Structures are given as structure tokens and as C-alpha cells.
Image (spheres, rainbow, N blue to C red):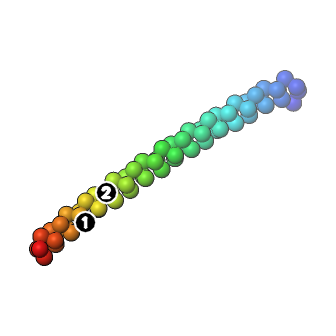
Amino acid sequence: MNLKDQFYENEKRIAITRKLMENARERIKLSSELEKELKNLELQRRMRQLEMESKLLKQQEKELG
């Protein structure tokens, strides 16, 4: 393989590596966004649970009071 072929082969490898790194960055970004969404969903679920517990306690208070 001559120098010109080696150069083009290296250029191809560099381009592939860049693309792989770009894809990895995008997956990390998406992963981070999904993690935030999950946390938000967990918080929403917990808020609903607390609302239900509050309603139940108020109802029990009425029944006892």
C-alpha cells in the first residue's frame, strides 16, 4: 500500500471515528434527557400518591371527628 492509499485509509478511519463519537454523544444526550423525564414521572407519581393519602386522611378525620 502506497502513502496515498494509506492517507485515504486513515481519512476513512477518522471519518468513521468522528461519526461513532457523534453517535455516542447523541446517545448520552438522549440518555440524560430520558433520565430527567423518568425523574419527573417519579415526582408526578409521588405527588399523586401524596394527594391520595391526604384525601384519605381527611376522610378518616371526618369519620372520627
When asked about the image quadrant of residue 55, the answer is: bottom left
- At horizontal 56% and vertical 39% (from top left) the residue drawn is 26
Task: Give the vertical position of 45 relative to 59 (above or below).
Answer: above
Residue 42 in the image, given as x and y percentages of width and height: 38, 56
Residue 41 in the image, given as x and y percentages of width and height: 37, 52
Circle 1 crowding by C-alpha within 10 Å: few under 14, some 14–19, many from 20: few
**Cα–Cα gap, marks 1 and 2:** 10 Å
> What is the total number of numbered labels drawn onto the structure image?
2
- At horizontal 39% and vertical 50% (from top left) the residue drawn is 40
| Mark found first going from the N terminus, 1 or 2 | 2
- At horizontal 37% and vertical 55% (from top left) the residue drawn is 43
In the picture, the disc for residue 10 is none
Q: In this view, does 12 lie to the left or right of 53?
A: right
- At horizontal 25% and vertical 66% (from top left) the residue drawn is 53
Q: Is residue 3 left or right of residue 47?
A: right
Residue 60 in the image, given as x and y percentages of width and height: 16, 72
Residue sitting at the far bottom: 64
Residue sitting at the far front: 65
Circle 2 crowding by C-alpha within 10 Å: few under 14, some 14–19, many from 20: few
Q: Name the residue under label 2.
A: 47
Q: What residue type is labelled 2?
A: Met
Q: What element carries label 1?
A: helix
Q: Which residue occupies the foreground of this view, 45 or 5?
A: 45
Q: Which amino acid does label 1 sit on?
A: Glu
Residue 6 in the image, given as x and y percentages of width and height: 83, 29
In the picture, the disc for residue 53 is 1
